[in-house]
Amino acid sequence: MPRLTWLLCLVVVVLAACVGTRPVVRPYAPAPWTTRLRDLQQATSWQLDGRAAAAVGTQGWQASLNWRQRGETAELHLAGPLGVGATVLKKTPAGVSLNGAAPSDAVIAQLQDRLGFDLPLTDLRYWLLGVPSPGTPFQLTSNAQDRAQQLQQSGWTIDFNSYMAVSGDLLPSRVVLSRGGVRVRIAVDHWVAPT
């Protein structure tokens, strides 16, 4: 009988030890703004998939949006419903190309004509990540999570309406850009985290 009692006591001690070693769940704590700003402005590789809609005066368009950033090269795919109006923009240090055409002033004019406004590609690379473009003056209002709520830069107002958790950080999921009679809404469905 004492042997059975000893065995039961041992089982109780082992079970109690197992209960006491549950992992501690810590609340989600994204990096502070200063760290995030530096890291995202220096990010060289990231991508997003989502949707874009633009209103230019009384005209407008909608498209799926895929952005791939690799170093100084950005590739942007826009496609309307059922693939109608597919456009591929590529921005490299040599300039902007449209649907494979060599970079030139004519390409920029064609792009502006097709979209209805001058797309701020250089700044947009940073704005999509929720940070200002480096080297250009800006005004910033932060939200309760210490992230950009509104950014004013290069004549544009950028509202960050919501964020999503991505690899331990928060990245924009709803962005609205506006300037004059132009309003562009971007909804991000999927992020590949910046590195």
Image (cartoon, rainbow, N blue to C red):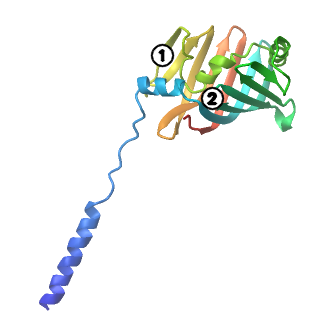
In the image, farthest residue toward the left: 2
Number of labelled discs? Answer: 2
Residue 109 against residue 17 in the figure, above or below: above
Point 63% across, 17% down: residue: 123
Q: Quadrant of the C terminus?
A: top right
Question: Considering the numbered disc 2 on the image, is that residue within a helix, a strand or a loop?
Answer: loop
- Residue 144 in view (yes/no): no
Question: In the rendered image, is residue 5 in sight?
Answer: yes
Q: Position of residue 10 (x, y in %)?
A: 20, 77
> Which residue in the protein does label 1 denote?
141
Q: How far across and how far down the image is residue 183, in percent?
A: 70, 17
Task: Say which quadrant the N terminus sits in.
Answer: bottom left
| Above or below, comparing residue 83 to residue 128 in the picture | below
Residue 95, picture quadrant: top right
Q: Which residue carries the number 2 mark?
A: 71
Q: Nearer the viewer, residue 49 or 181?
A: 49
